[in-house]
Amino acid sequence: MTDEKGDFAFRSDTNMGNWHDMTYGGVLSFLRRRYSRDLEGVDVAVSGLPYDGAVTGRSGCRLGPRAIRAASAGLAELDAFPFGFDLYSKLNIVDYGDCHIDPHHAETVAQTIRDHARRILKTNTKMLTFGGDHFVTYPLLKAHAEKHGPIALIQFDAHCDTWEDDGVGIDHGTMFGRAVSEGIIDVARSTQVGLRTQHDQDVGFQMLTAPWVHRNGIDKALAKTIDRAGDAPVYISWDIDGFDPAYAPGTGTPVSGGLAAWQGLEFLRGLGGLNLIGMDVVEVSPAYDHAEITALLGATVAHDFLCLLAAKKDV
C-alpha cells in the first residue's frame, strides 16, 4: 500500500507520471495534472479564462473551464486512445489555474488575458486554454503573434466571427476580422471548419462549411487544411458550437447541422504533422449541457491536442 494515491493535483512534487485518483472524488485539475505556476521544463500550461461578457446569445461559458476540468477526470485514468501511449510519461503538463479577470472593468479584459499569455509564452511553454467566450482568443492570438509572427489559424466553429467591427468593442463575433486586419492572422494559411451560418463578407479564409465536410469527408478536408497551413505556426481555436448541438448542446449559440463528435476528433487527430503552437477550447456553457456531454467533448478535444504534441516528441 502506498500513500501516493489521490489528489495528485496538489500533493505530487513532480509533474510527470500519474497517481490513482477516484474519478468521482478529489481535486479536479485538468487531467489530474499538478497545479503549478513554476514552468521550468514544462511543455504545456493549461489555463482557464472564465469570461463571458462578450456573448451575444446565452451567457454561462465563464463556467466552462471548471466544467471541462471536471469532465476530464475519466480521461486521466488510462493510456491515451487511439494513440496508445501514456501521455503523462511523455509530456510535462501543468494546470496553471485560471487567469484572474475583472468582469466589472471590461476595458481591462483583453490586456489582462494578453499579459497572462505573455507570462507563459516567454518561458517557451505552449498554452492550452479554456474559455470563456470566443473573444478571449483575440488577446491570446496577439500574444502568440508577438512570439511567432503572423499565425495560421484553424478555427472550428458554426460562425465565421468576422462580422463588421468598430475596432473597439468586445464581441465574440467580430474578433477574427479584426485580427486579420491587424496582421495577427496569416489568412492565406488559415482555414475555418464547420461553418453553417450565412455571412457574405469574405476576408480571405479558406472556408470548409459543415455541409462541405459532410459531403466530401474528413480526408479531403484535412488535405485542404494541411496544404494551406504548410509550415506556418498553427494555432487551433475550437468553438464547441463547431459540433452539432446533438453532441454539444451546452453552448450559447447552437446551430443545427454541425460536425459529429467523431468527425471533429478525427479531423483534429489528423493535424499532428503541422507546426502546432497552441490551442483553445471555448464557449462551453454547462448550464445548457446534458449529462456533461459538451464538457466531455471539450475535454476530449483538449486531451487529443496534448496527445498530438506528445507524439511529436517521438519524431
Image (tube, helix red, strand yellow):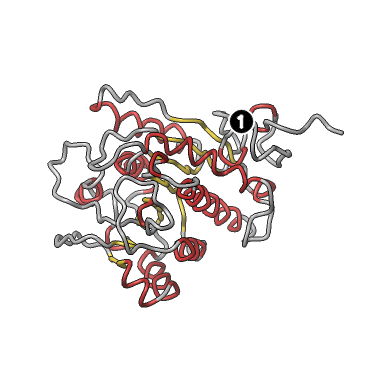
**Residue 163: in sight, yes or no?**
yes
Q: Quadrant of the N terminus?
A: top right
Residue extending farthest right: 1
How far across and down, in percent of the image, does residue 212 sit? 32, 72
| Along the viewing direction, whichever of 155 and 142 lies nearer the viewer | 155
Q: Amino acid at mark 1?
A: Val
Does 310 sit left or right of 103 as displayed? Answer: right
**Residue toward you, 9 or 290:** 290
Dot 1, how many residues are within 10 Å of its Cα: few (below 14), some (14-19), or many (20+)?
many
Left or right of residue 80, residue 132 in this image: left
Residue at the (68%, 46%) spot, across then down: 77
Q: Position of residue 123 (x, y in %)?
A: 50, 36
- Left or right, 273 with reference to 221: right
- Residue 159, located in which quarter of the rendered image? bottom left
Q: Label 1, on which residue?
A: 27
- When asked about the image quadrant of residue 143, the answer is top left
- Residue at the image position 38 percent from the left and 67 percent from the top: 225
The structure residue drawn at horizontal position 46% and vertical position 57%, both measured from the top left corner, is: 275
In terms of depth relative to the viewer, which is nearer, 190 or 186? 190
